[in-house]
Image: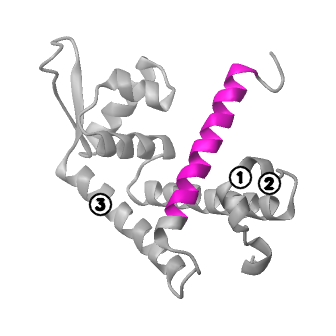
Amino acid sequence: MTRDPAALALSAADADDFEPTLSADTPVVREIAHAMAETDAAHRRLRAVFAASVGLSPLEFNALMHVGERGDTTPKLLAAHLDITTGAITALTDRLVGAGLVGRTPNPNDRRSLLLSLTETGARARDTMYTQYHEAIARALQGGTGLEAGDITALLDRTAEAITATADAIEAVPVLPH
């Protein structure tokens, strides 16, 4: 969907004084929310396609990427990040180790625990994914956006913070109590 940049432009007052001047029920907010939903769907599809291309389920791929982003991590911390049980994380890490993507080493700080880290093959898979992802973003930015990269980054960062705060608020007070 192509959007008219002039119709979506925020005034300087909107950008500087966001809350008082921009209602959530405006065309610009709905258009941006729609574009973000499209971006999210495309991002999730890219991750699922990449996962399948290296023989992983989306959950296994998320685990691989988390280990790659965090560096050495314990199965317990990975299970918490993925919101799965310790039993499920054992089976998942067994599959990643069996595929040669993740290695296990003793945890020097806790002899009852292990550390998970990417193998060379796992790092290569992660790096390939990031390269392709960055190339997609570069293609999206070609031809210019009318915005500086720092402005785009700042907007995306603020948006992530606002969405996270909303998720935190919903966790504290569910929309439909159960």
**Residue 99 percent coordinates (x, y):** 29, 45
Q: Which mark is residue 31?
A: none
Q: Which residues are magenta?
A: 152-173
**Which secondary structure is most common in the magenta stretch?**
helix
List the single residue furthest toward the left: 108
First-in-chain label (3 vs 1) = 1
The residue beneath circle 1 is 18
Helix, strand or loop at label 2? It is helix
Q: Which mark is residue 21?
A: 2
**Which residue is at the front of the view, 86 or 158?**
158
What crowding class fits label 1: few (fewer than 14 Cα within 10 Å), some (14-19), or many (20 or more)? few
Q: Is residue 62 above or below residue 176?
A: below
Q: Which residue is painted at 53% across and 52% down in the image?
A: 157
Q: Residues within 10 Å of mark 2 (few under 14, many from 20)?
A: few
Membership of 172 in magenta stretch: yes
Nearer to the camera, 85 or 16: 16
Residue under the image location 54 percent in, 84 percent down: 144
* Callouts 2 and 3 close, C-beta under 8 Å: no
Q: Is residue 38 rendered to the left or right of residue 7? A: left
**Displayed quadrant of residue 39:** bottom right
**70 to 127, vertically: above or below:** above
**Residue at x 80% of width, y 64% of height:** 28
Question: Which residue position holds label 3?
Answer: 127
Q: Label 2 sits on what residue type?
A: Thr
**Quadrant (top left, top right, bottom left, bottom right) of the N terminus:** bottom right
Q: Residue type at mark 1?
A: Phe
Quadrant housing residue 22: bottom right
Between marks 1 and 2, how big is the CA–CA gap? 6 Å
Q: Is residue 120 magenta?
A: no
